[in-house]
Image: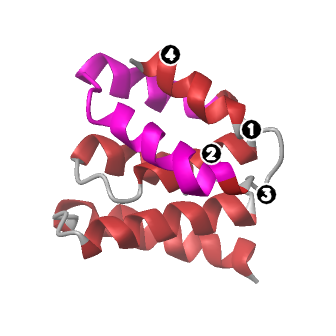
Amino acid sequence: MYNEFDKCISLFSVEMEAPDYWHDVGVIHASSLLEEFTGDDWSKILGAVVDKSDAWLVRLCEAIGGFPSDDALLVLLKVIGSNNREVFFAALESIRSMVFVGTDVSKYLREIELAVVSGKEIAD
């Protein structure tokens, strides 16, 4: 399932600014693929983020945002360490969305706090 997700995200990762189709349809499709992820798929995505473009990472954050799982949160915690402002804010917004839908992030509060503190340099 990871390969299909990667292809979907890659189609919309040529530029940082996504086309309307991504926001209208693509993100919904990508999010639905996440529902079928296995532990192996989550491991693949966690390992792949280091080699992906900033635009791909933003699309990932947009797709993963409302997905309530520890696996998704761990991916976001890895992505939020990016040195790119758009990626940092996309990951932070996705974590906020996860909290909004009721995801328990309490065991990751320290990691989130450290990411926000280190990300302040990027935000300024």
Q: Kindly indicate whether the residue at mark 2 contacts the one at mark 1 (C-beta within 8 angstroms).
A: yes
Q: Which residue is mark 3?
A: 17
Amino acid under label 1?
A: Ser
Q: Tell me which label, 3 or 2, sits earlier in the chain.
A: 3
What SS does tag 3 mark? loop
Instruction: Please state which amino acid type lies under the numbered disc 3.
Output: Glu
Residues 104 and 124: in front is 104
In this view of the protein, can residue 23 be seen by the observer? yes
Q: CA distance from mark 4 to mark 1?
A: 16 Å
Residue placed most toward the observer, 61 or 117: 61
Q: Which residues are magenta?
A: 21-50
Of the numbered discs 3 and 1, the one sitting upstream in the chain is 3
How would you rate the neighbour count of disc 4 (Cα within 10 Å): few for under 14, some for 14-19, many for 20 or more?
few
> Distance between the Cα atoms at labels 3 and 4?
23 Å
Check the image and tell me how it is coloured: secondary structure
Residue 56 belongs to the span the image colors magenta: no
In the picture of the structure, the residue carrying the numbered disc 2 is 57
What residue did someone put label 4 on? Answer: 3
Gap between marks 2 and 4, in whole Å? Answer: 15 Å
Q: Residues within 10 Å of mark 3 (few under 14, many from 20)?
A: few
Disc 1/disc 2 C-alpha distance (Å): 6 Å
